[in-house]
Amino acid sequence: MISILYNLDDSKKIVIKYVDTLKESGTLEFSEFKVLLENTYSLLNSNDDDAYNIGLYSICHIGEYLPIDNFLLQLLNDCIVSSRVFLYKEMLPKKIKVIEDSFFDSFAKEIYTLDSGTVLTKDQKKLFRLFNKHKRLIVSAPTSFGKSRIIEEIIIHNDYTNIAIILPTIALLSETYIRFNANPNIKENYNLINSLGLADTINKHTNNIFILTPEKMDMLLDERPDLKIDFFVMDEIYKIQDDEDRKGIFSNCLYRLSKMKTDFYLIGPYFDDFSPRFREITNSHFEKFDSEIVQKDVYNIFDLEEVKFTLGGKKIKKLKDNKKNLKNILTNINGQTLIYNYRKDYVEKLANDVVEIFHENNNENVDSDLIDYISDNISSEWSLVKALKKGVAFHHGAVPRYIQTEIIDSFNNQEIDIIVCTTTITEGVNTSAKNVILYSNVLGKKDKPLTGFEVKNIKGRAGRFRVHFIGRVFYFHKSIENDKTIILVDYYDKENLSSEDIIQIDKEDLKDENLKRRNKIEELLHANKIPLSLIKKNKYIPINKQIIFINFLRQNPIILQLVYFKNKPDKQHLDEIFTLTRNYLFSDRDLNDKSFIYWELNRLLKYYIYYNPSIKQLITEQKYSKTIDAKIRSAFKLITHYFEFAFPRYFRAFENIYNFVYNEYYNNIQNSGISLQYIITLLEFGFVKENEIALKEAGLPNDIVRKVSERFGDCNSLEQVRSKYRLNPNIINNLTLFEQKMFRKYI
């Protein structure tokens, strides 16, 4: 028997040595397992963070290649108790007789159990204590650490009135709402608001939790400037720096909430520091955790010198062609797989290649109702339909949100085996993937190399706590992983802010060059006789473009008559409004978007507004796309970027500017102008009736909203819809069984 060395450095070497052997061969001799477990126990009982992490590394690999021996299981149990990750025991295979908890085990577990019944890990308990000490906490911790799990405990153990949970994606909103709604300690004490359609319930309840995107939260604060938030959370906080399209709204939302002198909890994975200036101004504390409770085995396919590599005891041949390497890996690994690629069209093509690998077998686990639903409501020719039949899916920003959600749910229910995706699935979406393959090492259409932070974030999706001990990561190209990431916030850290950001910040919070520029902006607006409040209201529309447009209308008052209307604009008026908006208010990015030619965008806008087409009809109208996949991508980009996001912002600014000049020209005698609210509402939601907007805001697709609209015609809010459904569940019996399932999920 090999003797045990209890020197800490020696124990680290022994553990790493035997785990490497275990990974290579898939097993160890009894005596080797014993040495490995005893040295693991030694590491876990030290006060050294590196030793603790190596101890977790060992537990996870032993759990993956578990020996069926009661003595070794007892040693493993002792290691798990020492790790204070008690839920590891629940992950052991049911067929193995798990050792009963001793008095010491139960006592140790009790120390880490909150009065809510939640059992914390060692690091989670430290995190919980840190929040209770500082009340303003910023946390970086790996995926599967359980950062989000602490949110509920913070709420339960504090006396907050109004809470805001800010999440970047609809998928995370839905997941969080469902989790909170299932927690009796939260549901019984708080009114959950996950849409602006429920905002009118604020006054009916003492305690409210708002679960919203940054855009919706910002709109709520505009509508309710009197609203006081006591505690807020921002998940995936790194997006405040990385999301070019939305980082302005993220910054603005964080700024407005933190100005309320409230408690907060900002969380995300794998960053090394967070805006020192923000931390100083808000007197907040930053803490970084490195312990991975789900370990990762990494295979650098590109860097292997040998012809073969070992995967779970199997020898896999390495080939020059990456598609062949992909086939070898997919046919020799167990567990579900995410494959990262960097462009929507490349993702779809790679998914088709994966389908060919499994072309002989249909996947009988896939929900045929989902396939039928997509075929009936989008297209039976969409390559996603063919892929799903083989247990394969793709996931990117041009896939409708409700289909994205169904794909993730089917994947987590093990109905889908493989998803080929962009970063839409690797950023904050919880999946049951055991394997992650980085087929590409670039990001977006500009072929920009993935940063180390982005690589770690994608890699972090391999393995899910309480499902896997080990996640596997396969690199097909050389990737950066070790660069240092500091999350900076434009509002606090940028020395040369954009003019649009400068006017959103309170003047007393500006300094140096930004303060000088604010003064110049105010002087410019004063010289042009334009109130700051007007420009500030038109968030993120370039100030210089607004000034030029205002002066154009002043110099051409005939337009005030040409575009004037009382109610909904007709096609001629809308045509004029679109032309002026595009010429004067569009961002440079939208002006230069080659996906949609100017007149085609104008045509599709009017088609959508006046003909209320189904998604199938809108897909057929994509004249400049050749294949059905390209038509579908084009249609959903049109909806998500232009109709739901960009056009409402531009048209609000148009309305504000037009009415300002109109009332100025007529000396405020008429105090009138135009209203584009009908158009804006229809674009944002696809509907204008209150009950239909409430159903759409909850997440239901348009076709289901149309089918049940009349049945909820007397409802003015989502709360009333839910109440009516509870009283009469058969009210949705005109839907298919699959559509009824979707209705229940969202409503």
Image (cartoon, rainbow, N blue to C red):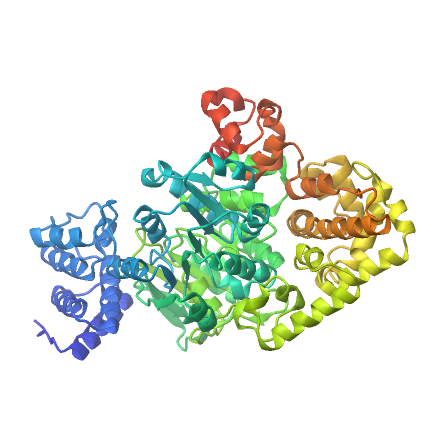
Residue 461 visible in this rendered orientation of the protein: no
Quadrant where the N terminus sits is bottom left
User: At 57% from the left edge and 25% from the top edge, which residue is drawn?
Assistant: 712
Percent of width and height locating residue 115: 22, 46
Q: Would residue 155 appear left or right of 672 to someone viewing this image?
A: left
Task: Give percent across and percent down for residue 373.
Answer: 57, 35
Towards the viewer: 596 or 718: 718
Res. 739 visible in picture: yes
Residue furthest out toward the right: 558
Q: Which image quarter: residue 143?
A: bottom left
* 190 displayed left or right of 521: left
Horizontally, is 509 left or right of 281 in the view?
right
Splitting the image into 4 quarters, where does residue 294 fall?
Answer: bottom left
- Measured along the vertical axis of the image, is residue 747 above or below residue 411? above
Q: Position of residue 613 (x, y in %)?
A: 72, 36
Q: Which is more toward the observer, 498 or 269? A: 498
In the foreground, 142 or 107:
107
Relative image position of residue 100 (x, y in whole percent): 11, 48
- Residue at (72% x, 61% y) in the render: 587
Q: Is residue 38 left or right of residue 116?
A: left
Number of callouts in the render?
0
Residue 484 quadrant: bottom left
